[in-house]
């Protein structure tokens, strides 16, 4: 009986481990668009706000989000585009290092009481170590995200997809705050205090 | 059973701990990278003939090195330390096997040991013992396509200790200027820090980078160097290195001039074929190079494949060198001077 009890504990632990891994799979937030390209796409209702107001807030967000690139008006009405890049890492723990950078574009479109955005055009630029021990981009190598599995294998690609998914989710949160005109919610850090009065 | 439970608990905790670290907006982690390499070489004259660096042992399974680099950046300040130990940990504090504090009997094995600071987004200051900015090839086998090295690499600087400032005008143009120790490669100067070095980097189009380099000093001589590479298509890359060196008056007369071309073609996801064609000419004078006699020249052709299996690269390579003169240094199987030398190398490089 004791053996069975322990087995239950093992299975429960394994289930916890599995759940933890599933919860961490941020890549699932990415989808494919009609052209079979990776996209992070959301439509958000924003009652009582006009398209112009939302567009202005979206524009302000784009300027603040990426200060090195100016947003540009899109072809469609009330549409804006901006682009940027972020680092992705390879390896874990002590062996973690910059594996490359991801270039992307953000497209925001507004209408009365609603806006939508898409983060897409993901392109991976691999890094290599230079003679000075720094990780730098390999000149001239650009791999669209859709072709990464063929070039780098599933394990490596999934690792990068998770980081891209995580970036998209956090970007979505920041955009929502900008559209709500509220400062980004900070995690309430409870300060643990111990009572030294009663002992 | 308890051990298994403990192990599982540890694994679960590790996952959550790793997740917590990943989501923290902090400075990049301490970066550890490096490589190990080993090789087998067969020289067709049955003894080592080529004077260029590395892959030196004939008919032997030999080792290259274990290269271990640490990098950490906090805010705008960073350091890089590549490989093991230095003088503080050796002769300045610990005696040699002979019981003496002997600076000449040390083996520091430092490739890079420097600190740097980003004054602004465009201006970086760096000081310490750094890999040279000159030339196409490097010491680390991970940074080279061919396993054997060129005459230009072997005869150029490996490291330049000093202080340099790099200003990036744009992502396509940057300028570095610095003052370095009076001699190349050594951990300390002879007694001056008077070698001037500069590098202009331009990236005219995507995939094409070019570096114009100069290094000049009263003791180290003067070298001008052009290093450029162009990833013309996804599969084809072309590299070029050209340099000319004049020895310092204090050292002697002469020097060298050379050019090397590096076409490389990726024939599959994991296999790339490459060629190195080099012409290396020594100037007349009394300065001796690792190459043919002063006033002579050599043409070297190297055919190399890089076969990748994850972090492991297997490198089969065939090389043929042809000296201008029969007395330029190559010795045939029978022991007679010859103009030609050829070798086969099979190397394995693991990068991490």
Image (cartoon, rainbow, N blue to C red):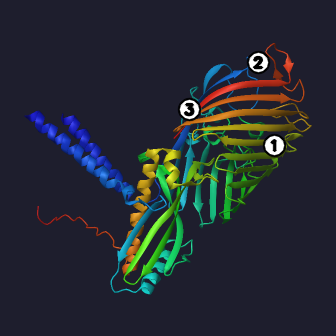
Q: Is residue B131 left or right of residue B27?
A: right
Is B331 in front, or is A191? B331
Q: Where is residue B110 shown, x and y percent of the image?
A: 60, 41
Q: Chain of mark 3?
A: B
Residue B195 is tagged as none
Dot 2, crowdedness within 10 Å: few (<14), some or many (≥20)? some
N-terminal label among 2 and 3: 2
Is A74 in front, or is A176? A74
Please tell me whether mark 1 sits on a helix, a strand or a loop: strand
Q: Are marks 1 and 3 in contact (CB under 8 Å)?
A: no
Q: Where is residue B350 shown, x and y percent of the image?
A: 54, 35
Residue B186 at least partly seen: no
Tag in front: 1 or 3: 1
* Residue under pointer 2: B45
- Look at 37% across and 55% down and name the residue there: B21
Q: Is residue B306 above or below residue B161?
A: above
Q: Chain of mark 1?
A: B
Dot 1, crowdedness within 10 Å: few (<14), some or many (≥20)? many
Please tell me whether mark 2 sits on a helix, a strand or a loop: loop
Q: Is residue A77 left or right of residue A138?
A: left
- Look at 82% across and 24% down and name the residue there: B340
From mark 1 to mark 3, how far is it between C-alphas?
45 Å
N-terminal label among 1 and 3: 3
Q: Is residue A32 left or right of residue B211?
A: left
From mark 1 to mark 2, how far is it between C-alphas?
26 Å
Q: Are marks 2 and 3 on the same chain?
A: yes
Q: Is residue B298 above or below residue A81?
A: above
- Look at 79% across and 33% down and name the residue there: B300
* Residue under pointer 1: B259
Q: Chain of mark 2?
A: B
Residue B95 is tagged as 3
């Amino acid at each position: 009986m004791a053996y069975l009890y322990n087995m239950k504990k093992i299975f429960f632990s394994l289930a916890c481990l599995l759940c933890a891994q599933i919860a961490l799979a941020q890549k699932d937030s990415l989808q494919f668009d009609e052209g079979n390209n990776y996209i992070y796409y959301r439509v958000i209702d924003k009652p009582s706000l006009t398209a112009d107001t939302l567009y202005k807030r979206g524009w302000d967000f784009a300027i603040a989000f990426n200060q090195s690139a100016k947003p540009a008006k899109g072809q469609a009405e009330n549409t804006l585009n901006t682009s940027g890049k972020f680092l992705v890492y390879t390896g874990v723990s002590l062996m973690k290092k910059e594996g490359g950078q991801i270039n992307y574009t953000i497209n925001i479109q507004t209408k009365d009481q609603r806006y939508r955005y898409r983060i897409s055009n993901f392109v991976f630029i691999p890094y290599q170590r230079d003679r000075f021990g720094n990780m730098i981009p390999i000149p001239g190598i650009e791999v669209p995200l859709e072709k990464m599995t063929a070039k780098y294998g599933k394990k490596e690609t999934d690792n990068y997809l998770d980081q891209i998914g995580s970036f998209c989710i956090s970007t979505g949160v920041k955009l929502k705050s900008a559209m709500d005109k509220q400062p980004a919610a900070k995690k309430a850090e409870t300060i643990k205090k111990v009572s030294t009065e009663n002992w | 059973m308890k051990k298994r439970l403990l192990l599982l608990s540890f694994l679960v905790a590790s996952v959550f701990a790793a997740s917590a670290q990943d989501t923290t907006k902090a400075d990049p982690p301490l970066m550890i990278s490096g490589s190990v390499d080993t090789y087998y070489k067969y020289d067709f004259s049955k003894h080592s003939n080529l004077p260029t660096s590395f892959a030196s042992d004939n008919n032997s399974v030999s080792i290259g090195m274990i290269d271990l680099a640490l990098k950490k950046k906090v805010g705008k300040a960073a350091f890089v330390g590549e490989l093991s130990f230095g003088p503080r940990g050796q002769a300045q504090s610990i005696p040699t096997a002979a019981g003496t504090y002997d600076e000449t009997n040390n083996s520091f094995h430092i490739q890079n040991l420097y600190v740097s600071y980003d004054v602004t987004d465009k201006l970086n200051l760096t000081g310490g013992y750094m890999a040279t900015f000159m030339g196409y090839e490097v010491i680390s086998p991970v940074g080279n396509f061919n396993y054997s090295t060129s005459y230009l690499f072997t005869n150029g600087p490996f490291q330049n200790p000093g202080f340099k400032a790099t200003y990036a005008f744009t992502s396509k143009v940057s300028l570095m200027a610095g003052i370095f120790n009076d001699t190349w490669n050594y951990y300390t100067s002879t007694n001056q820090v008077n070698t001037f070095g500069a590098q202009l980097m331009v990236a005219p189009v995507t995939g094409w980078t070019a570096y114009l380099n100069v290094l000049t000093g009263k003791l180290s001589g003067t070298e001008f160097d052009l290093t450029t590479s162009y990833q013309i298509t996804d599969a084809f890359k072309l590299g070029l290195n050209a340099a000319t060196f004049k020895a310092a008056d204090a050292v002697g007369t002469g020097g060298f001039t050379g050019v090397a071309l590096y076409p490389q073609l990726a024939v599959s996801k994991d296999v790339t074929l490459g060629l190195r064609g080099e012409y290396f000419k020594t100037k007349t004078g009394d300065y001796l190079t690792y190459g043919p006699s002063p006033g002579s020249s050599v043409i070297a052709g190297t055919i190399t494949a890089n076969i990748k299996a994850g972090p492991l690269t297997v490198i089969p390579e065939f090389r043929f060198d042809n000296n201008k003169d029969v007395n330029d240094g190559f010795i045939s199987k029978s022991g007679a001077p010859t103009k030609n030398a050829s070798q086969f190398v099979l190397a394995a490089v693991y990068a991490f």
